[in-house]
Amino acid sequence: MLKVNPPKYVRQTLFALQARGHLAYLVGGCVRDAIMGITPQDWDICTSALPDEVMDIFPDSSPTGLKHGTVTVKVGSKSCEVTTFRTEGDYRDHRRPHSVTFVSDLISDLGRRDFTMNAIALSADGMVSDPYDGITDIENGVIRCVGYPTLRFDEDALRMFRALRFSARLGFEIEPNTLDAIKQKAELCNALAPERVRDELEKILLSPRPEVCADAISFGMLRRYVTGSGWEAPPLADLSELPKKPLQRWITFSIMLQKYGFIPSAEDFLRELRLDGRTVRCCRSAEEMLRDQPPSDKLGWKRLLNRYGVDSVSCAVSAYGVLLHTDCEKDFKAVLKSGECFSLKHLAVTGDDLLNAGLKGHELGEMLKFLLDYVMEFPENNKREILMELAKYSEES
């Protein structure tokens, strides 16, 4: 018997289903995490109740995935997903089943799942259903497909990325048959939607083992995006030294791939994976900065911050450390903490001040630029009276 103490709203959901004569179990990631001593972030329930029956029991529920038997149940301000036991038909696009059939038994439902560690169910009273020995695999740190690995990946190619992601996040090994099937079926990944590939890669990049991304490349799972073979393996493990921020890790990862000959353009790589515009812009800026050595003084950092912005410079600083082994983070942060001006919004005078002083159009813009350059070099003089006097003197001269 496994002792798990789910939140009150989850227990209420389980008990309400059981009170109406239905089977109901916690299933999937929440059970896996509980076995590992990790507090689950989401609680999923599977049940013998049909979706209409679930909605009758919980009037405030929402039909978030009726085609696949999923209803989002609300209890107070909380919610959890409740899905009817089901089996699945053919996967014609290697991603989603063409049809599902609702069934009444738990074992059939567990048999359709991806990995043994995710095919464990737990009743409200702590009784475990583990037909594929997933608990043993969790204890041994093994990722193993339910049933035949090639069939599982033929059904849903994204499962290959999930296997790598779990390996990166949990530190588990992928068992040989499952690993061989990934290598055999890797080409199917190139038909997946870029957004789905991006989301899985990001989770690997933010994991304790971002170097697992190299496996996705070497197996051919990213051939649609990584077109070169490279001349040596990039040190992707160094990415773990960076803050767990998508922006910095994506940009350093993509620039690393470009540097080592795996892709022709870091910017295009990110764009093809449907990264947001901010990330693409920061990548372009970081690439420009990396053509030179990092600044040697505060003025140089302020000029970079003025030209590219905090996000882009922060990403370049991360890349300097990983790619050039140049530790400039301390100098960069010292400039930020100093509070010294490097942008017009921190300048002690505004465009309205200069407009009231008689400047306009092109002259006003040039004067603001001149004053900002002056203040970046002489930060102690970022005072309104000094700058207005300087503007007046410069105009007269």
Image (cartoon, rainbow, N blue to C red):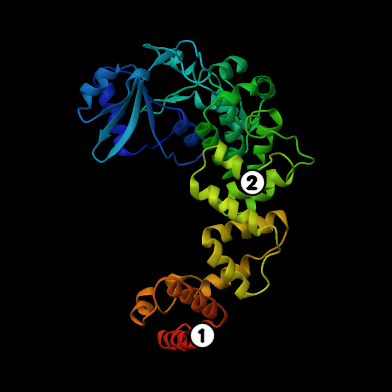
Query: Which residue is depicted at the point 49% across and 50% down?
Result: 278
Residue neighbourhood size for the residue with mark 1, other residues' Cα within 10 Å, grouped as few (<14), some (14–19), many (≥20): few
Q: Can residue 159 be seen in this view?
A: yes
- Relative to 320, does residue 87 appear above or below in the rendering? above
Taking the image as shown, residue 282 lies to the left or right of residue 129, namely: right
- Residue corresponding to mark 1: 380
User: Picture quarter containing residue 329?
Assistant: bottom right
- Residue corresponding to mark 2: 253
Q: What residue type is labelled 2?
A: Phe
Q: Give coordinates of residue 110: x percent, y percent.
A: 47, 18
**Element type at mark 2:** helix
Q: Give coordinates of residue 60: x percent, y percent.
A: 21, 31
Q: Do the residues labelled 1 and 2 touch (CB within 8 Å)?
A: no
Tell which circle, 1 or 2, labels the residue nearer the N-terminal end.
2
Give the number of the disc on residue 85.
none
- Of the pair 363 and 294, the residue shown nearer to us: 363
**Element type at mark 1:** helix
Q: Which amino acid does label 1 sit on?
A: Glu
